Each structure stands twice: as C-alpha cells, then as structure tokens.
Amino acid sequence: MIIGCPKEIKKHEYRAGLTPHCASAYVRHGHTVLVQRGAGSGSGFEDQEYSDAGAKLVDSSREIWAADMVVKVKEPLPEEFQYFRENLILYTYLHLAAAEELTRALLNSGVKGIAYETIQTDDGHLPCLTPMSEIAGRLSVQEGAKYLEKTFGGRGVLLGGVPGVERGKVAILGGGVVGLNACKIAVGMGAEVTLLDINTARLAYLDDIFQARITTLVSNERNIEKIARESDVIIGAVLIPGAKAPRLIRREHLKLMKKGAVLVDVAVDQGGCFETTRATFHDDPVYLVDDVIHYCVANMPGAVARTATLALTNATLNHGLNLADNGVEKACRESVPLQRGLNIYTGKCTHRGVAEAFGLDYTNPETAL
C-alpha cells in the first residue's frame, strides 16, 4: 500500500500521525510511505529523519491524500473533505458522535474510517485512546491550577495550600483513565480531591489505590451540586466510547460555583460534559460564563506534542501495519478490537453510538465487511 501522513492543519496541533520509526516499520513491511514536509516538525522530528527512514517527502496535501491509507492524528477538517473518495482508508481520531458534518461527508464519499478512540479489547480497554487520556488527565490539573491563579482571572488559590491555609479543592467527574491520571497529579500537588463515578466498584478500587487520600462519591445530582458549591477546579473526565458525553454540569450549576473557579472539560472532543462547553484552542484556551473560567481545548495533548506523538504511535502502529498488510476487510475480520474501531465503511455507519447520535441506520461491522 501507499501510506500517507499529512501535516495536521487543526489550529495549534503539533502532533504527527507517524514518527520516523513508524515510517521505517511500514517500509520494512513493503509499503511506500509519503510524508508531507513539516509533518513532524512540531513534535521534533525533522524531514531528513523521515527521509533517512525510507519515506518519500512530498509538498502538497493532495499528494498525501491520494495514498491508499492516510494516517493522521486529528479528525479531518472541512477543507480536507475534498480529498475523500471511495475506498480511501482513513486511520485517525474521528470523534464522530460530536461531528455530524464530518460523519455525513465520510458516508457520502465511501471512505473506510477507522477511529483510534473506539478500538477496544474484550476487557473494555481502549489501547489507542488510553495514552492521550493519560496525558490529558495529567495536563487537566496543570491547566486548572494555572487558571486558578489570580493573574489568569482565577480565585487566586494554590491547590496545595501552605501550612495554616486550607488546600484547594479539586473535583473529578469520572474515574476512568483520564480521571485516574488527573487524580494522581491533583493528589501529588497536595489538593483536596473528590472523585465521582457511577461505578461503585471503580470507586472502591480508586479509594484503595489512593489509600483514602481522596474522597469518592457516587455521581448523582445531589453530589454534583455539592462539588459545584465547594470546588475550586472541576475536571470533566467522563467517556462513553464512541458516543456523546453526558452533560453533567448544567448552566444552573454555575450559579452555585465560586467566582473564579475553573472548569476543565477533557471530554470536549465528544461534545463535552458541561452544558456551557465550546471548543477552544491553545492560543485562546479559556472563556468566562457566569464568572466561572472554562478551559475546553479540544486537543490538549497537542501542547506536549513530542511526548504525545511518541505515546500515540506506540499504540497505533501495530494496528496500522495490520490494516496496511491485510486491508480493512481481512484485518477487521481477524481482529475484533480493530473491527470495533471501524466507524464508517463504504457508505455505511458501523458504530452504534455514532448512528444513534444522528439518527442514522446502523450496520453491524461483521455484516458490512
């Protein structure tokens, strides 16, 4: 196959779909790799490294998108829809349940779309989403702490406090990978941490591993109101794989919150778990609603692009090689996790969460293939 790696065009997105190591792996498997000039520079990988790895450097996006399979990081933007065509294999984050225009463009063009975020093993693990969730979870507390500073419009509270002064209060909605990693950083910074989840077994596990250094609460309306009143930072870390995130913090909850408190929505790619969420970018990451600061950057890991690119490609490379070596049909028939990653297949919606989001007909991927 011809594998194409375009330069990301989303605002302030510095990650790359392939590292030079990845390019070399595809070449060793007998494939041709095209890399758009500058695709890796934001992550610290220079064009010469790709060339040395056996990739061919090209200048234009059109040349890249003419490949048999395009490997990238973020979902295509409208200006890239023109490159969609029948039987193109698109291997990237798609987040379709929050992107109707993209979903319909993929369906209408006959693309075969495999989404990193819905590749799932039998035990529920999301191997290609996990590394970015780990990074976003850890970053969420850093960003929350920063925007809590008075110079950024926050309450002027230090999360760790000092002797004689109470610590800042952090609430985390969701005890999955994002929530766990946010918890690690918040506890490490010395904050008073409360974590909410609907799964009591998960709460018991988290209580155990943090050795009672956090408060765990069942996520319900009463407890959400409680943390809205008390918290300095609330982190939205709720995920329903492939589907829209539930809106747990509603507009009326903002009236309960402290002036200058901070909301960090890590679920913004899936529509966000705050009613007042709207996607922002790294150069203008926050906005105010009812005196509450909202941080809703849709590509948080892009801020630490080298770490994120290495972590992402560690997870995506083997699945990508499987697709390139065997084609979508054989690869997805033989790999159940990869089959779960198939969201769009030649005009059919093959992910139930995406179909339900927009009232589309759902086709079981086994049937579609």
Image (cartoon, rainbow, N blue to C red):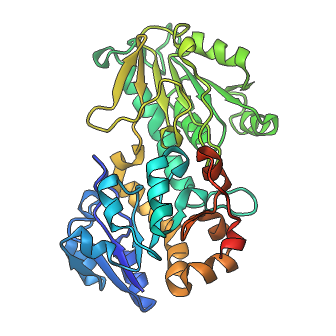
Question: Measuring 40% from the left and 31% from the top, which residue is drawn there?
Answer: 143
Question: In the image shown, does 87 or 41 lie closer to the viewer?
Answer: 87
Question: Measuring 61% from the left and 45% from the top, which residue is drawn there?
Answer: 357
Residue 51 place in picture, x, y as percent: 24, 81
Left or right: residue 266 compared with residue 291:
right
Residue 349 place in picture, x, y as percent: 60, 60
Question: In the image shown, does 165 or 75 lie closer to the viewer?
Answer: 75
In the rendered image, the quadrant that contains the N terminus is bottom left
Question: Measuring 72% from the left and 26% from the top, which residue is drawn there?
Answer: 219
Quarter of the rendering containing residue 259? top left
Whether residue 259 appears in this view of the structure is yes
Question: In the image shown, does 199 or 142 lie closer to the viewer?
Answer: 199
Left or right: residue 325 compared with residue 282:
right
Q: Is residue 309 above or below residue 99?
A: below
Whether residue 336 appears in this view of the structure is no
Quarter of the rendering containing residue 123? bottom right
Q: Is residue 300 above or below residue 126?
A: above
In the rendered image, the quadrant that contains the C terminus is bottom right
Count of numbered marks? 0
Q: Is residue 126 above or below residue 221?
A: below
Residue 263 place in picture, x, y as percent: 48, 24
Quarter of the rendering containing residue 328? bottom right
Q: Is residue 329 above or below residue 70?
A: below
Question: In the image shown, does 367 or 320 lie closer to the viewer?
Answer: 367
Left or right: residue 367 compared with residue 294:
right
